[in-house]
Structure formats: C-alpha cells, structure tokens
Amino acid sequence: MIRVGIVGATGYSGVELIRLLSQHPQAHVNRLYTSSAEGESLVPVFQHLTGHALPRLEAIDPVRMASDNDLIFLATPAGVSSALSPQLVEKGARVIDLSGDFRLSSPEQYRSWYKKEPAAQEWLDRAVFGLPEWNRESVADAALLANPGCYPTATLLGLLPLAKSGWVDPQSWIVDAKSGVSGAGRGVSLGVHFSEVNESISAYKVGQHQHTPEIEQELCRQTGVEQLIQFTPHLVPMTRGILATSYAKLHTSVTAEQLQALYETAYADKPFVRIRPFGSHPRTKEVYGSNYCDIALHLDERTGRVIVLSVIDNVVKGAAGQAVQNMNIMFGLEETSGLPIVPVFP
C-alpha cells in the first residue's frame, strides 16, 4: 500500500483526494497535515466523512512527513509549496503539488502572473508538468510533479492534437472558458457569495488569468513553436465543471473527417479522454464526479476556424482525480486504479 499524506485536507481538492483515495485498492490516507488545527478531526468540518476512519490533523514537519509517507499531496494555496516541496523531496518523499508553484518554468513569469515570489530555478527545472495523456514517461519518473490547473487541463487536452498537427495558426488561439464556483476554493468572499453568483454569469481576470502562461508554455513545449492564446474565464452559478470553448484559424484545408480522425488517434489509448461524435455538444453534467475529459469538434467552413469543446469536472480531472491518476503512473499502477469510471448523473 502507498502511504499517502495530504497537506490542505480542509480545502475542496484535499477533501476530494480523501474521497478518491478511500476507494483506492493500493493506497491509503496515512497522514493529514495542517498549519492551524493540529490534533483536530476533519469530520466536524466535513460531515459527509462521518464513519470513515481518518487520521487526525498533524502539524507540518517536513522531516517526519517524508519519513511517514511514500507520497505527499500538497493541496495548498500558491506560495506554500514552493518552500515546502523541496524539503520533502530532499528527505526522500515524492510530491504532487496541486498549487501553481511549479507549473511555470520561468520564475519571472510566476512572479508576474501570481504576484508571489517563485521557487528556486533548480526546482522549477526539476518539476514535471503532470498532464499524463501527453507527459506519461516524465510523470512515471517524477519526484516532484506539478499537477496542472483546472482550466489548462480542459484547454490543453482540447487543443494539443490540433496544435501538433500544424494545421492551425499558432497565434490565433482564443479560449472562452466557464467554471463552477468550486474553482474559487472554500474561502469566503463577495465574489462567490450566493446572492452575487446565482442567476448570473460574469467574466473575470480578463487578459490576466494566471493559467494563461501555463497553457502557452505547454503548447510550446509540445510543439516546439511559440503559441499565443487569448484566454477569458467566466464564473457560472454551478458547483462543479468547466466548459472550454476554443477557436483556432486554419491555414490549410482540412475536412471534418480528418479532424475527427486526428483526435480519435491521439487519444485512442487514453482512458480518461472521450472523443464525442463530430459536431456534438458535451455538457459538464456528463462528466460530473468523474476523471473524464469529453471533447467534441466543429468546423466552421465560413470562417475557416476549428471550434473545440472540452468539458471536465474541475475538482476531479482538474485537480484531485488527475493527481491520483498521476500517482498511479508514478508508482507503476493501473492508470485508472481507484478512479470512478462512471460519472454521476443527473
């Protein structure tokens, strides 16, 4: 059994990790860590965990943490992992970081987009970007893994086959993405207050969202060509889910059949990516509670653009589920182990 420790268990990603790992046949939640509630139980915070045997929250001590666990998930706010992860790795633990601290290879970009001090360059260089459908070999060998953000996961899975095809202008990407409120975390703020969000939809961080350089960086890494995206996120009044609608300008003649074949071939052996029939409209409801990403393609011959629709559950495939998927690969397990294979519906 893989001994797993979780830092940040009181957040949505942390408690989702507990849900998924409690069903995992080859891993178990060994330790839970906190910076403020040492000795307390999670059950008073999350009543749905009643009856489940879970360890009490412990103080953060990198030496003990590395000794007590084979793998540590860091479901922490940005700026925490950059200091803690190197200490854990140096003491022999493997780390999956769900924050954004190791996703960007450039400290200057991190400082600019996250408005925080970055990790040391040597650790940014060591970190593996954990998009398993495209980086599986690197994920398998990783000691420090940067779990991708929720928006980048939905967007990159939708765009990478097309980006690598050479059929589109790499400077023409436009991404219009919509997320449920859980993407903002458990923190209380006016922006996620029920009365403010209900029966409304709004854009936010227009041209400034910190996931923008993450998407561009991975597109460039996978293609070897500089990429530019216009990314606009929106908040919608639902709990879970992301719909990313992405547009790209074709610079060669392509048929609908070629587009569909491109994606079906790219993801033929990827268990958590489902390519829908050409011209269909996947809904977030159809991946709810699962680790799937559903993708559908449209071709607008009038404008010469390809439109890619991709949907995920932001808490699962966009965070905890993808982290467990990466854990499975890192420890040589079946990639689907412990992950739900049927979404929740309705």
Image: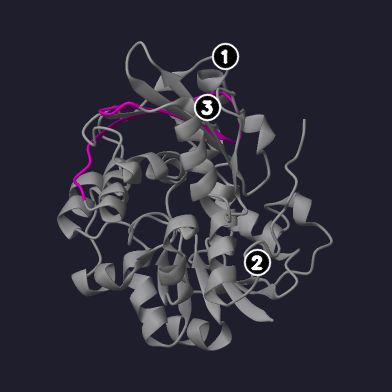
SS category of the residue bearing label 2: loop
SS category of the residue bearing label 1: loop
Q: Quadrant of residue 212?
A: top left
In the displayed structure image, the side of residue 202 where residue 335 appears, left or right: right
State whether residue 258 is above or below residue 77: above
Between the C-alphas of marks 2 and 1, the distance is 37 Å
Q: Which residue is mark 2?
A: 40
Callout 3 environment at 10 Å: few (<14), some (14 to 19), or many (20+)? few
> Which circle's residue, 2 or 3, is located before the other in the chain?
2
Comparing labels 1 and 3, the label whose residue is closer to the camera: 1
Image spot of residue 125 (x, y percent): 25, 70
Residue at 30% of width from left, 47% of height from top? Answer: 219
SS category of the residue bearing label 3: loop
Q: Is residue 248 magenta?
A: yes
Q: Which residues are magenta?
A: 225-253
Q: Quadrant of residue 278?
A: top right
Q: Which residue is mark 3?
A: 193
Residue in the foreground of this view, choosing between 244 and 301:
301
Farthest-out residue, right = 51
In the displayed structure image, the side of residue 24 where residue 333 appears, left or right: left
State whether residue 257 is above or below residue 49: above
Between the C-alphas of marks 1 and 3, the distance is 12 Å
Between the C-alphas of marks 2 and 3, the distance is 28 Å
